[in-house]
Amino acid sequence: MTQAETTMGIGTMRGQWPDWLGRLWVPAGIAAAAATIVLLLVVAQSKSAWILLGAGRGFVPEEYYHVSGFVLVLATSFGQVAGWAGGSALFVYVMTLVGFETTWANARIAMSLVYLGLAVLPLTIFEIFFGQWLLGIPRTGLEEYLAANYPDAHWLLIQAHPVVDYSLIPLALVFLGVLWGFGGRAQRSLVLQTILALALFGTSLSVALSLGIHSTLAHIRL
């Protein structure tokens, strides 16, 4: 292969890779840091809840259950974001196989559908598995028990629980609104990309926290 052919091949590859994808590490880094800080604050304010969950029981000392809970929720959040990115790319690829063009509109369709799956599917499966509604597992005396013995856990499991669950609605409105309301500007604007990343990481964190809250409620024995 000649040098000219090599240069042409590299140029072709660069042409197939949208420039805006190479800049996403900035908004992604900002959103990842924000999600980590928010989770740190939540765990710091609700240590008893994570002790009740007992993530890593048998492997992690009890005094570090809040640390293992933090790691578990954070890993779940970041894993969901990675799943959204991979799922969106796969969805776009499948669309091209059935005849769709690789356009920004089709990419937004793929990203939107995978996003809705990210926000709805895990909680739906979880709720079906435990046979309960989204807002928790009703149990007589649970609120009083937590308020008397674990007030910080009561704050997260009872008071903040609906806020965590219902936060998915405004987060979805922001994500889908920016994605569809600003057209191609979302490909070029670092500010819009950061808002999208914050909404995406926020959604993943809310889902992971909700799963953690429900798991904790399921582990409590009165």
Image (cartoon, helix red, strand yellow):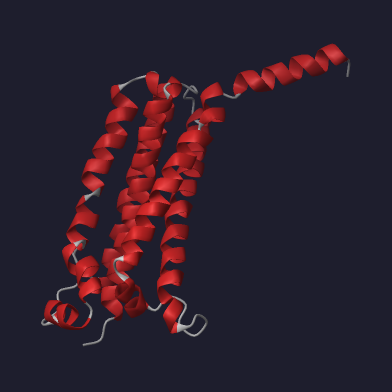
Residue 214 is situated, as x and y percent measured from the top left of the image, at: 28, 69
Which residue occupies 49% across, 85% down?
58
Q: Nearer the viewer, residue 38 or 95?
A: 38
Q: In this image, 75 relative to 120: left or right?
A: right
Residue 221 is situated, as x and y percent measured from the top left of the image, at: 25, 86
- Please count the marks in the image: 0
Q: Residue furthest top?
A: 4
Q: Residue furthest bottom?
A: 222
Which residue occupies 75% across, 19% down?
9
Q: In this image, 197 relative to 206: left or right?
A: right
Which residue occupies 50% across, 33% down?
24
Tell me if I can see residue 21 in this picture: yes
Residue 149 is situated, as x and y percent measured from the top left of the image, at: 20, 83
The quarter of the rendered structure image containing the C terminus is bottom left
Res 160 quadrant in image: bottom left
In the rendered image of this protein, does residue 207 appear above or below residue 194? below
In the rendered image of this protein, does residue 67 appear above or below residue 22? below
Which residue occupies 33% across, 55% down?
207
Tell me if I can see residue 134 in this picture: no
In the rendered image of this protein, does residue 65 appear above or below residue 108? below
Q: In this image, 86 relative to 69: left or right?
A: right
The quarter of the rendered structure image containing the N terminus is top right
Residue 17 is situated, as x and y percent measured from the top left of the image, at: 60, 24
Q: In this image, 53 relative to 146: left or right?
A: right
